[in-house]
Amino acid sequence: MSINQAHYQGGLLLYQGEQIVNHSKNVTLAFDDASRQSGDIFRGKHKGKVFVTTHRMVFLSDDQRDSLVSFAVAFMYMKNLSVEQPIFGANYISGIAASHPNG
C-alpha cells in the first residue's frame, strides 16, 4: 500500500512492465476503520478514477489539492476481497489493504 506515490503531474505512474488492464472514472474511495487511527488523510470520501493494472489497483483523485492524491495497493497485499452487488445502490469492492513489510 502506498499513499501519494503513484502519480506524476496528474497522471498515473507505472512500473516497468506494468500494464493497465481496466480503468473507471467517477469512482468514490472511502476508508472505514483506518480513518480513526491514521489521521485526516483517510477521512471522508475521495472522488476520482481507479486503474487496475497487472500488479496493483491505483486510485487517482480528481482534486489535486486533496490530501489523498493517489492510493495504490498491490494485489498480494489485499485480503478479504469481495464484490458487492446490492439491489438498491451501486456495485462496490471491499477488502483489507495491508502495508508492505517495514512500510
Image: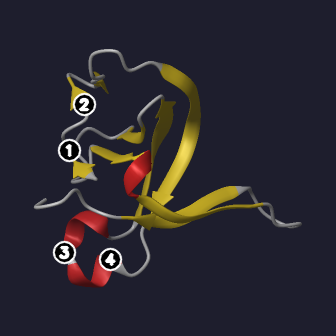
Q: Position of residue 91 (x, y in %)?
A: 73, 56
Looking at the rendered structure, the kind of residue marked 1 is Asn
Q: Give the number of the disc on residue 61.
A: none
Task: Specify the quadrant of the image occupied by residue 37.
Answer: bottom left
67 lies above or below 54: below
Q: Give the number of the disc on residue 34.
A: 4
13 lies above or below 42: above
Please tell me which of labels 4 and 1 falls first in the chain.
Answer: 1
Residue furthest to the right in view is 87
- As measured in the structure, the alpha-carbon distance from the residue carrying label 2 to the one carrying label 4 is 22 Å
Residue at 39%, 37% (x, y): give it: 62
- State if disc 3 and disc 1 touch (CB < 8 Å): no
- As measured in the structure, the alpha-carbon distance from the residue carrying label 2 to the one carrying label 3 is 21 Å
**Residue that carries the numbered disc 2 in the rendered image:** 7
- As measured in the structure, the alpha-carbon distance from the residue carrying label 2 to the one carrying label 1 is 7 Å
- As measured in the structure, the alpha-carbon distance from the residue carrying label 4 to the one carrying label 1 is 16 Å
- State if disc 1 and disc 4 touch (CB < 8 Å): no
Looking at the rendered structure, the kind of residue marked 2 is His
